[in-house]
Amino acid sequence: MSTYMLSLFRDNFGPCQPLASRR
């Protein structure tokens, strides 16, 4: 569950890191 939340968080609050978001 943590990974999922982290993924969403990165995708929502990670515009500076699109690579991490995609990953």
Image: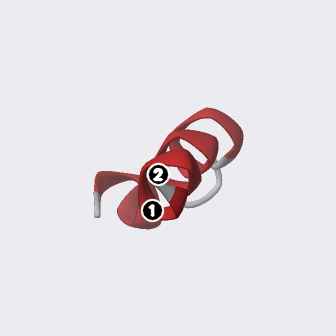
CA gap between label 2 and label 1 equals 6 Å
Q: Which marked residue is nearer to the observer: mark 2 or mark 1?
A: 1
For label 1, the SS is helix
Image location of residue 13, percent across then percent down:
71, 41
View extreme (front): residue = 1
Give the residue at x 64% y 49%: 14
Q: Looking at this view, is 7 or 18 the one in front?
A: 7
Give the residue at x 43% y 66%: 20
- The answer to whether the residues at label 2 and label 1 have Cβ atoms under 8 Å apart is yes
Which circle marks residue 15 in the picture?
none
- Name the kind of residue labelled 1 in the image: Thr
Crowdedness of circle 2 by 10 Å Cα count: few (<14), some, many (20+)? Answer: some
Residue placed under numbered mark 2 in the picture: 7
Give the residue at x 28% y 64%: 23
Image location of residue 9, percent across then percent down:
63, 44
Is residue 1 shown left or right of residue 23?
right
Q: Looking at this view, is 23 or 15 the one in front?
A: 23
Tally of numbered discs: 2
View extreme (left): residue = 23
View extreme (right): residue = 13
For label 2, the SS is helix
Which circle marks residue 3 in the picture?
1
Please identify the quarter of the rendering in which residue 6 is found. Answer: bottom right
Give the residue at x 38% y 64%: 19
Q: Is residue 6 above or below residue 8?
A: below
Image location of residue 11, percent across then percent down:
51, 41
Query: How is the rendered protein coloured?
Result: secondary structure
Crowdedness of circle 1 by 10 Å Cα count: few (<14), some, many (20+)? Answer: few
- Name the kind of residue labelled 2 in the image: Ser
